[in-house]
Image (spheres, rainbow, N blue to C red):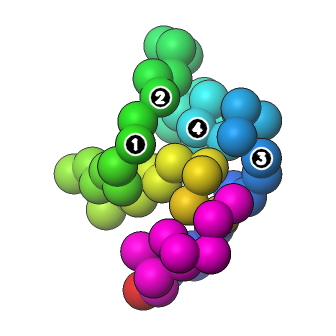
Amino acid sequence: MKRIAFVGTVGAGKTTLFNALQGNYSLARKTQAVEFNENGDIDTPGEYFSHPRWYHALIT
């Protein structure tokens, strides 16, 4: 299985792009928590890449 990561600044459109690629064209909502869906996809807030103290949450 291939893994893909969309990395960018807050508000760059990472979640919107991800949703569009899955055929979901609804507006992305801002979240402050890591979210998982039934397909095993993981959505993390952009702030997790901006603050080193949150890097531990990104380690898989």
Residue 36 x/y as whole percent: 29, 54
Instruction: Indicate the amino acid at tag 3.
Output: Thr
Question: Of callouts 2 and 3, which one flags the residue occurring earlier in the amino acid sequence?
Answer: 3
Q: Nearer the viewer, mark 1 or mark 4?
A: 1
Task: Identify the residue position indicated by label 1 in the image.
Answer: 32
Please state which of residues 23 and 10 is positioned toward the viewer in this rendering: 10
Q: Disc count in the image?
A: 4
Segment colored magenta: 50-59
Q: CA distance from mark 2 to mark 3?
A: 13 Å
Q: CA distance from mark 1 to mark 3?
A: 15 Å
Disc 4 on helix, strand or loop? helix
Q: Main secondary structure of the magenta part?
A: helix
10 relative to 59, above or below = above
Instruction: Indicate the amino acid at tag 1.
Output: Gln
Horizontal arrangement in the rendering, residue 26 relative to residue 7 (left or right): left
Checking the image for residue 9, the label placed there is 3
Instruction: Give the quadrant of residue 56.
Output: bottom left
Task: Report the residue at 53% width, 33% height from top.
Answer: 19
Question: Of callouts 3 and 4, which one flags the residue occurring earlier in the amino acid sequence?
Answer: 3
Residue farthest to the left, as pictured: 38
The residue carrying pointer 3 sits among few (fewer than 14), some (14 to 19) or many (20 or more) residues within 10 Å by Cα, namely: few
Instruction: State whether residue 24 appears in this view.
Output: no
Do the numbered discs 2 and 1 sit on residues whose CB atoms are within 8 Å? yes
Task: Report the residue at 48% width, 54% height from top.
Answer: 44
Task: Identify the residue position indicated by label 4 in the image.
Answer: 15
The residue carrying pointer 1 sits among few (fewer than 14), some (14 to 19) or many (20 or more) residues within 10 Å by Cα, namely: few
Horizontal arrangement in the rendering, residue 46 relative to residue 56 (left or right): right
Disc 3 on helix, strand or loop? loop
Task: Report the residue at 45% width, 23% height from top.
Answer: 29
The residue carrying pointer 4 sits among few (fewer than 14), some (14 to 19) or many (20 or more) residues within 10 Å by Cα, namely: many
Task: Report the residue at 70% width, 40% height from top.
Answer: 10
